[in-house]
Amino acid sequence: MPSEIVIKCSKAIVEKGWNIAFAESASAGRMSAEFSMTEDSGKILRGGIVCYEVFVKEQLLNVPHSFIEKHTPESAEVTQILAQQASKIFNSKITVAITGLTTPGGSETIEKPVGTIFIYIITPDKKTNHQEVFNGSPEEIILQAIDKTAELIIESL
């Protein structure tokens, strides 16, 4: 069952007559899945790409390897490119990209601990770049990030 904020966000997207698409790394499709379980999913959900591994970011979404090496796969810069590329693929009114660290062993640093999530949202009127550190299990981190994304989308409509 999607959260109240995801349901509210879906209704707000319907009211605008818009649609939404996702490029998901850290959430590996969970964000698309949560939006697919709202009663309005058929009216708004265009689709999504799971780009968990660097290979997919590079090959499917055309993020330059040198760019990933410079900024890391989990970064605001890479997340922005993922959103821009997915926006072209899906021709969506709202495009969301998400990367981040839900478990140890990635590109984590003291400045970028586990729980750090990068979200980039493109709408016809606004571009939103958001970074936040969430706490909890990998699933809890992702569910918090999904709710935060829904909140950011509502704010940008």
Image (cartoon, rainbow, N blue to C red):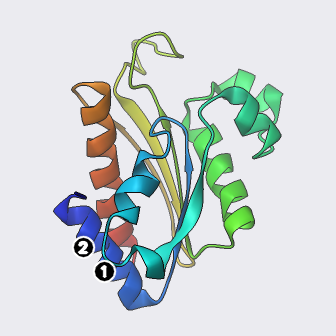
Residue position for label 2: 8
Secondary structure, mark 1, is: helix
Q: Residue at x 41, y 19 (%)?
A: 111
How many marks do you count on the picture? 2
Asked if residue 94 is positioned above or below residue 28 in the image, the reply reads below
Amino acid residing under circle 1: Lys
Asked if residue 107 is positioned above or below residue 56 in the image, the reply reads above
Decide if residue 64 is on the left or right side of residue 152: right
Asked if residue 108 is positioned above or below residue 96 in the image, the reply reads above
Q: Where residue 61 sits in the image (x, y, percent)?
A: 75, 46
Q: Where residue 127 sits in the image (x, y, percent)?
A: 53, 64
Decide if residue 86 is on the left or right side of residue 125: right
Q: Quadrant of the N terminus?
A: bottom left
Q: Where residue 102 sits in the image (x, y, percent)?
A: 39, 25
Discs 2, 1 touching: Cβ within 8 Å: yes
User: Which mark, residue 92?
Assistant: none
What is the distance, in whole Å, between disc 2 and disc 1 at their CAs?
A: 5 Å
Residue position for label 1: 11
